Image: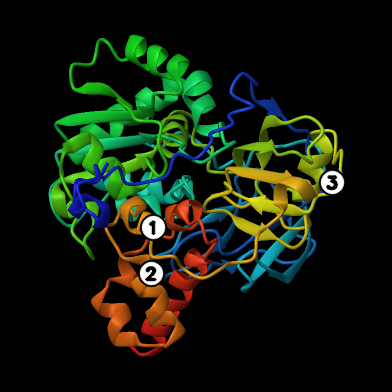
Amino acid sequence: MAKQSGFLATLGFARDPGAPVPHRKNTSASATEVMPVPATVTIAMSMHIGAPCTPCVKPKDHVDVGTVIGSSPAFMSALIHSSVSGTVKKVDSILMPNGSKTQAVVIDTDGQQTLDPSLKAPEINSKEDFLEAVKASGLVGLGGAGFPAHIKLNPATPVDILCINGAECEPYITADEHEFLENYENVIYGITQVRKYLGVEKVLIGIEGNKPGAIALMKEKTAEYDYISVVTLPARYPQGAEKVLIDQMTDRQVPPGKLPADVGTVVMNVASIGFLGGYLKDGIPLTTKRVTVDGSAITTPKNVRVLIGTPIKDIIDFCGGYKETPAKLISGGPMMGIALMTDDFPVLKQNNAFLAFNEKDAKSFEPTSCIRCGRCVDACPMNLMPTKLEDGVLFKDVEILKEYGVMNCMECGCCAFVCPANRKLVHAMKLGKMYVREAGQ
């Protein structure tokens, strides 16, 4: 973990940033099940960081699996493809889980899953060909950020280390673990191709120590590659955060405001590299996603391979439905996920889990006064002072927020998790960032 000293370290205590969250990997032994084609899919035009796509189909158009249905001329964007074959029902405006609105293409499926006849494995003879192929695939960061992969894989500065992020440190989620177990051939092939065209010298595969099966398998399957090392990481949240992962595996620290490439590294989630390896072989773009469905309100927790655009409620029905009325539904993990007001939302490219909890598990506690214990400071992997930043938010003091680095917060939730007063610190960090942006700073 990060090696900076924190508040408790100044008092003589050892600093161990992060939080000892219970991992609860209930679906670790659950092989991925493929969900049947739903009657209708709703494919959002904004599933990536950057400019949303504009629909390039209209009602009554026929589409096949892999047909481009959304594109944008913007530099920071990613193509969107149909995940099904069928007929475009309508182009609509939908509400996203974060409260924003975007256009979406609604498709009535025909159940045939016919591939678009133009699909074929890309022919690659240069780095430019490789980047064009990545762009054509529609790949974005599948670990949750949704950063367009063709931009990430074209860094402005040379990189010598490729880090594969398989930490999966959030409780409940095991989708990435099963990417190793069930798709290791494409993971390794994707690694070889990224290494070839980016010219990296070393590849480090990071897996938390609570996934011994994945560690053993990847060590066995990569033994012939002298440039690949499998690194066993401490099972401590937020081990999968990009800057924390780089620090842990390479002993390089990414400065505030800088990117991994600035310290000679590029990081790819294991699901991203696994998909890329498959795409380079068959040319089928990003149209499906493996997600973990779990939580105390779910009848049968599973790992499920779903089509992008599938309604979340259909996936939960595939897992036996709710065994109790859910009091909280989350997209993602309980630490950094987004609470959903309904299960009508469609699956996005960057989704990796849907968790539903009963009233007992979802119960929240009212915050009390800060007792100045310093636990949040010691837990912060970015070495921030959440209590000082919370004060800046309360007084809307942009100068304090800037001085104490609110924009460096990655909203991991460690501070809120360890706080004995139940302070809503992550919410405060989000507000603080908003105040700084609104001030134009």
Secondary structure under the numbered disc 1 in the rendered image? helix
Q: Is residue 222 above or below residue 53?
A: above
Q: How far is disc 1 from disc 2 in space, using C-alphas? A: 8 Å
Provide the residue designation for mark 2: 387
| Closer to viewer: mark 3 or mark 2 | 2
Q: Is residue 319 above or below residue 431?
A: above
Bin the neighbour count of mark 2 within 10 Å (Cα to Cα): few under 14, some 14-19, many 20 and up.
many
Provide the residue designation for mark 1: 376
Bin the neighbour count of mark 3 within 10 Å (Cα to Cα): few under 14, some 14-19, many 20 and up.
some
Asked which quadrant contains residue 440, the reply is bottom left
Residue beneath the point at 72% across and 31% down? 301
In contact (CB < 8 Å): disc 1 and disc 2: yes
In contact (CB < 8 Å): disc 3 and disc 2: no
Horizontal and vertical percent for residue 365? 65, 60
**Is residue 383 something one can see in this rendering?**
yes
Q: Is residue 252 above or below residue 395?
A: above
Q: How far is disc 3 from disc 2 in space, using C-alphas? A: 49 Å
Most distant residue in the bottom direction = 439
